[in-house]
Image (cartoon, helix red, strand yellow):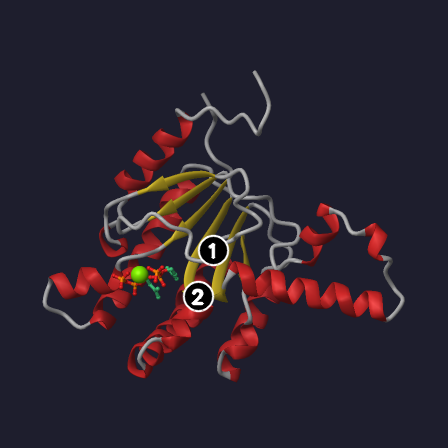
Amino acid sequence: MTSTPQHIAIIMDGNGRWATAKGLPRTEGHRQGAQTVTRILEAAHKRGIRYVTLYAFSTENWKRPADEVNTLMDLFRQYLKKDLSELEKQSVRIHFIGDRNRFPQDIQTQMNKLEQSTRSHDQYHLILALSYSGRDELTRAVKRLAEQVKAGQFNPADVTAEVIEAALDTAGIPDPDLMIRTSGEQRISNFLLWQLAYTEMYFSPVYWPDFTEEELDKAIEAYRARDRRFGKVK
Ligand code: IPE
Ligand code: IPE
Ligand code: MG
């Protein structure tokens, strides 16, 4: 029996299929999905879950049709302005992971502003993975470390797991206890490759726009029934 997870990471998948099944454009699924985010964050906080990481846009998602990418950018803009400003008031610290340089300048500015203004909050943490992939994060981290070695600031013999962790976008954030993927797909799709090493996995058949507080509870229940051994013998 395990206690309530401290950190839940979610691959919010199935927006497009949710819309298609209803005869709506895929973008409508993204609009609905954004509302699910607000609902699930509230539910997670009510349950005392301190860290929530949400996979909202992968580096591979840039290859989707331009109109879908543009709609997603507009939704991020709205979300950053309205919903996150609300969280700013509720003691939530906001972090962004991923390559933010690929976003339009106004979105980058808003991300930096939100991170700065919520810096001192510690009760709850929201980590938004935007233009993120695990391989891209690791590649950028290796590049930074290699630069330090080249500059003579760092000795290759001193590379440890802690050093790598500190070079990742998630530096300072504990690893997820539970990873939930919605929409029935059972794969990682380049999410948190390093951090998920000992995370419990839960796959829900529900499309993200239909994901509810009750579905979240099912995932937490499943997690509580797991026996986390971390390679050891009990
Ligand atoms: C997840 O839903 C949201 C993003 C990846 C931006 P999808 O857009 O992947 O929806 P499906 O998987 O095609 O149904
Ligand atoms: C993963 O979903 C990325 C996000 C949910 C943001 P995808 O829909 O992009 O992943 P694949 O293509 O099904 O693996
Ligand atoms: Mg998908």
Ligand 2 within 8 A of label 1's CB?
yes
Kindly indicate the quadrant of the structure image that contains residue 209.
bottom left
Residue 109 visible in the current orientation: no
Q: Quadrant of residue 17?
A: bottom left
- Image location of residue 136, percent across then percent down: 56, 65
**Residue at image location 28% in from the left, 66% down from the top:** 30
Q: Are marks 1 and 2 in contact (CB under 8 Å)?
A: yes
Q: Secondary structure at mark 1?
A: loop
**Residue at 61% of width from left, 49% of height from top?**
173
What residue would you read off at disc 1? 191
- Disc 2 on helix, strand or loop? strand
Category of crowding for the residue at label 2, using alpha-carbon neighbours closer than 10 angstroms: few (below 14), some (14–19), many (at least 20): many
Q: Does residue 90 appear to the left or right of 118 in the view shown?
A: left
Name the residue beneath numbered marker 2.
58
Is label 2's Cβ within 8 Å of ligand 2? yes
Q: Ligand 2 is found in which quarter of the picture?
A: bottom left
Q: Earlier in the sequence, mark 1 or mark 2?
A: 2
- The three-letter code of the residue at mark 2 reads Ser
The residue lying toward the viewer, choosing from 32 and 166, is 166
Q: Is 198 above or below relative to 26? A: above
Residue extending farthest left = 23
Q: Quadrant of residue 218?
A: top left
